[in-house]
Every structure is written in structure tokens, then in C-alpha cells.
Amino acid sequence: MGDDLQFKPVQHSVKLTDEAWAATLERAELESTTASEICERLLKHYLALEEKPARYLPPSGVTRRKRSVYVTRPVWAAARAQKVQEQRSVSAILEQLLRGYLGLDLGRPVDKAPDR
């Protein structure tokens, strides 16, 4: 039973823009799924990529609000490890993934940090 709990989605807080969140909710309805399932799917895909795409900052002037997403423990743990590696929050990673998936403006590219 303990292993089953590992794969049960758990609530996590992320800060996302109103635009990305509204579009995610809309897309979830079209796909007959939930916004959380879309977030988990995108994070899993991103984490599995050998080469990560260029980083972007959201368009200027947008505000981010706290949202609740339900993601399994292994995916969230991997996302937290990735955030340390990229030196940006899980929220920033997820915002970029959602914007790309939904066809929203990605914002402006960020210079890649030098390898250490």
C-alpha cells in the first residue's frame, strides 16, 4: 500500500499567470482531463528530455498567482531536482511548458547560464 501512495497525486502550490492558467483549464475541458493532469504530463515529458529547450521569461507586465496542482511525488521530486539544476522555480518551468503547449507568447529568451 505504501507504494500506491507514492503515485497518488498530491497538492502542490505553483505561481502561474492568469493567462496560462485560464488556457490550461480550457484545454483540460477540451481534452476531458484536468489541469493537474496536463501539468503532470508536461513535467514528465520535460524531465525526460535529454536536451532541455531554451529558457524564457514570461512576457513583461504579467502577474502570477498561487494555484494548486496535483502531481505525483516522484514527478514533483524530479521537478524540484531540476529546479536546483536550472536555478529557477518549478513554477517558472511549468509556466514555460504550459505557454509552449498552449501556443501562448513565451516571452523573452534568457541567456543560458554557463556550465560549472
Image: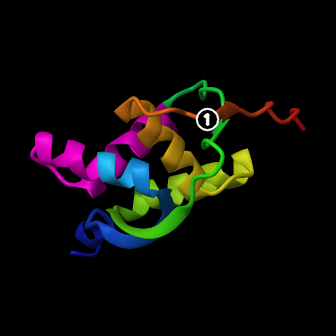
* Vertical order, 87 against 115 (above or below): below
Label 1 crowd bin: few (<14), some (14–19), many (20+), radius 10 Å: some
Q: Secondary structure at mark 1?
A: loop
Q: Which residue is mark 1?
A: 107
The type of residue carrying mark 1 is Gly
- Tell me what residue is drawn at x 37 percent, y 54 percent: 21
- Tell me what residue is drawn at x 41 percent, y 49 percent: 19
On the image, the x and y values in percent for residue 81 come to 62, 55
Q: Which coloring applies here?
A: rainbow
111 on left or right of 22: right
Q: What's the magenta bit mostly, secondary-structure-wise?
A: helix
For the C terminus, the quadrant is top right
Q: In the image shown, does 36 or 78 lie closer to the viewer? A: 36
On the image, the x and y values in percent for residue 38 come to 29, 46
101 on left or right of 7: right
Q: In the image shown, does 22 or 115 lie closer to the viewer? A: 22
Q: Check the image and name the residue furthest to the front.
A: 61
Q: In the image shown, does 116 or 5 lie closer to the viewer? A: 116
In the figure, residue 18 lies in which quadrant? Answer: bottom left
Q: Is residue 21 magenta?
A: no
Range of residues picked out in magenta: 24-48
Q: Is residue 35 magenta?
A: yes
- Disc tally is 1
- Tell me what residue is drawn at x 63 percent, y 57 percent: 89
On the image, the x and y values in percent for residue 66 come to 47, 71
17 on left or right of 36: right
- Tell me what residue is drawn at x 43 percent, y 45 percent: 43
On the image, the x and y values in percent for residue 1 come to 21, 75
* Vertical order, 76 against 59 (above or below): below
